[in-house]
Amino acid sequence: MEQLLTVMILTAVIITAIGLVVSVSNPLIESSKETASMRDAEYLIKLIDDSVREVVKEGTNSRRMLDIRSAGEVETLPEEDAVQIGFSSRAGLADYLTRLLKGNILFIAGSDVSCSNLTNITMENTFINVTFKKTQRTSPLTQINTTENIVSMHEKTGNTRVSFVNSSIIINDNHSTSRGTGYSELLRSGKSLPSCTTHFFVNNSAIEYDIYYTLYAGADFLTIDVRNVLER
């Protein structure tokens, strides 16, 4: 239940800072307005987060009605269990291509991520390009081996290509948990994104779990998150 709860309440504030250019007209007023907008967005995300926590605790038929108003663009991301608020900043509220995590709220300054879902799944930003093996979601599920999840990585600044010999996910030192049946999927595709995530589902006779590989704007690394581990 705790693992499920963690996924349900994940929220995020995304600052899509498309060119942090200082306003030449009246930068002090501009900065004051944008600071207030970001505080309002943070408050709204926290309100949503608190409401979800209360509804989960109260159980079946519990609900909350919220007045969602923001200076930024509000977007729900059901595949990522997140709520996103995005707006452009001209006053330099955050350093471009930086991230800050405060509780369940993630601030991202930048939008240089592009993701596509063709022969393989590709996630790319200014610094790295990562390719994942694409496994179709069929019935029955196809064979999957986490050793092969990451096909390749290209580090752009040094023009270095990395081939992974082993990218296994192993639970409780049991090597059999790295294999099973399952699928992979790109949760969101497009260009000029603050982040994107590739999801793998793995299932065998002993265990099932989800893997989330996320690339953030300006990051020269991947984050890997294993969730919903269910041992049989």
Image (cartoon, helix red, strand yellow):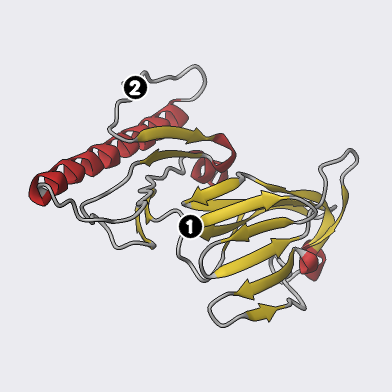
Q: Name the residue under label 1.
A: 112
Tell me the SS state at disc 1.
loop
Q: Position of residue 85 (x, y in %)?
A: 38, 39
- Residue 66 shows which numbered tag? 2
For the residue pair 150 and 55, the one nearer the viewer reads as 150
Q: What residue type is labelled 1?
A: Asp
| Contact (Cβ within 8 Å) of mark 2 with mark 1 | no
Query: Is 212 left, or right, of 12 in this rendering?
Result: right
Query: Is 111 left, or right, of 103 in this rendering?
Result: right
Relative to 165, does residue 110 appear above or below in the rendering? above
For the residue pair 108 and 21, the one nearer the viewer reads as 21
Determine the residue positioned at 25% across, 56% down.
21
Q: In which quarter of the image is residue 139?
A: top right
Relative to 228, does residue 174 appear above or below in the rendering? below
Q: Say whether residue 172 is visible.
A: yes
For the residue pair 34 and 202, the one nearer the viewer reads as 34
Q: Where is residue 56 in the image (x, y as percent from the top left)?
A: 46, 31
| Disc 2 from disc 1: Cα separation | 32 Å
Q: What residue type is labelled 2?
A: Leu
Determine the residue positioned at 34% across, 55% down.
19
Crowding near pointer 2: few (<14 within 10 Å), some, many (20+)?
A: few
Crowding near pointer 1: few (<14 within 10 Å), some, many (20+)?
A: many
Q: Say whether residue 228 is visible.
A: no
